[in-house]
Amino acid sequence: MATTADFRNGLVLEYNNDLYVITEFQHVKPGKGPAFVRTKLRNIKTGKVLDNTFNAGVKVTTARVEQRPHQFLYKDDYGYTFMDNATFEQVSLPEAMVPFADLMKEGQECTILFHAETEQPLTAELPTTVELVVTYTEPGLRGDTATNTLKPATVETGARIQVPLFIDTDTKIRVKTSDYSYVERVK
């Protein structure tokens, strides 16, 4: 059990007979009335986001989850297959349980969340940034780094992202996985 004072991003709650992870929260103390906590909860199984308000001090049931490092092996008709780095056991997850899968390439290290009581895999999480090679983009302009103008590019996994004008084909770049944004060139 936890109270609203224990809320933090990434905390997994048992709410409405399902598992939700807190993606955002804000403690609010209005001038009149009791304090409350405004949250955004993401359903782990479906990925849908739910806005919810909890009164301050309310007790909620937390779920024990474990993060285990895995390596992405391949994608087939059944979903995405990962290998545990310690035991070499393979886990297959359906596409709905792997957000941002189009930024994942074979051999990619990621983390899989497991429900501690049932040992059931819940979701796969990529690192905050990944390094990918640009396979196609329009020809760039050398030295054009002064403006924030972006152009579309396709990376080696097939994902389409926006990159600055000076990025050319076969350039290795770092991409932020949460919003598909360009971070920097990799030397």
Image (cartoon, rainbow, N blue to C red):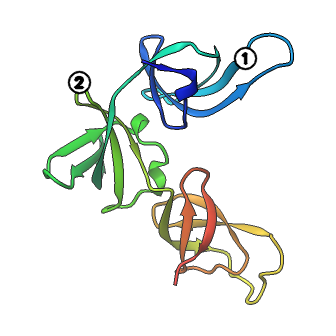
Quick one: 162 or 12, which is closer to the camera? 12
Quick one: 136 or 40, which is closer to the camera? 40
Quarter where residue 117 is shown: top left
Q: Position of residue 16 (x, y in %)?
A: 48, 11
Q: Amino acid at mark 1?
A: Ala
Residue 29 appears anywhere in the view? yes
Q: Is residue 112 above or below residue 36?
A: below
Q: Nearer the viewer, mark 2 or mark 1?
A: 1
- Left or right: 19 as drawn, with respect to 121: right
- Left or right: 174 as drawn, with respect to 144: left
Residue plotted at (52% across, 28% down): 6
Distance between mark 2 and mark 1 Cα atoms: 35 Å
Q: What is the number of the mark on residue 118?
A: 2
Q: Amino acid at mark 2?
A: Thr
Residue plotted at (64% across, 16% down): 56
Q: Which residue corresponds to mark 1?
A: 35
Q: Secondary structure at mark 1?
A: loop
